[in-house]
Amino acid sequence: MKTVKTDKKGFTLVEVLVAFVILTVGMLAIFEGLVLYMHMNLNNLCRDEAVRLAEERMNYYRSFGISSASGSEQVSRKVKNITRNFLIKWKAEDISDTSYTIKIDVTWNIAGKEYNHSIISIVSKGD
């Protein structure tokens, strides 16, 4: 009677499937992290643009001495080659005979969620 020598150098189908499942779970976790990173990066870039828009408007209104006005404006800017819409609202109110406040709110949406950046300045009325 001959004895058959079995060669155990390969992987079984079960071992291959378990390795595949582990790799798949790991890749899904990495993919989720990548999506989160891209979302946070886009939000940071939009916030930077909102800060720029608010500062531009604040400098404009402070230089022209607008002491009692309000309004809003829709502005489109490119962020990472994607056009994003920003809603700018401003309001100026007298707080005394010699000064007034200017408040500027910039709002934008990413993935159905609304974000906001606000700045307020007290301006002295010139003679």
Image: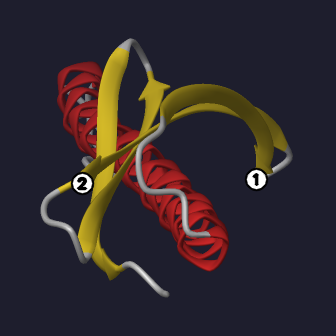
Residue ID at (53%, 74%): 62
Q: Does 63 sit above or below residue 80?
A: below
Pinpoint residue 4: horizontal percent, then vertical percent: 26, 34
Does label 1 or label 2 sit earlier along the sequence?
Answer: 1
The residue where tag 2 is placed is: 94
State how far apart marks 1 and 2 are (Cα): 39 Å
Q: Does 10 sit above or below residue 126?
A: above
Amino acid type, label 1: Lys
Q: Does 14 sit above or below residue 19?
A: above
Residue ID at (29%, 21%): 13
Pinpoint residue 80: horizontal percent, then vertical percent: 76, 53
Front-most of residues 12 and 51: 51
Q: Secondary structure at mark 2?
A: strand
The residue where tag 1 is placed is: 80
> Which of the two discs, 1 and 2, sits closer to the camera?
2
* Mark 1 surroundings within 10 Å by alpha-carbon count, few (fewer than 14), some (14 through 19), many (20 or more): few
Q: Secondary structure at mark 1?
A: loop
Front-most of residues 11 and 6: 11
Front-most of residues 4 and 41: 41
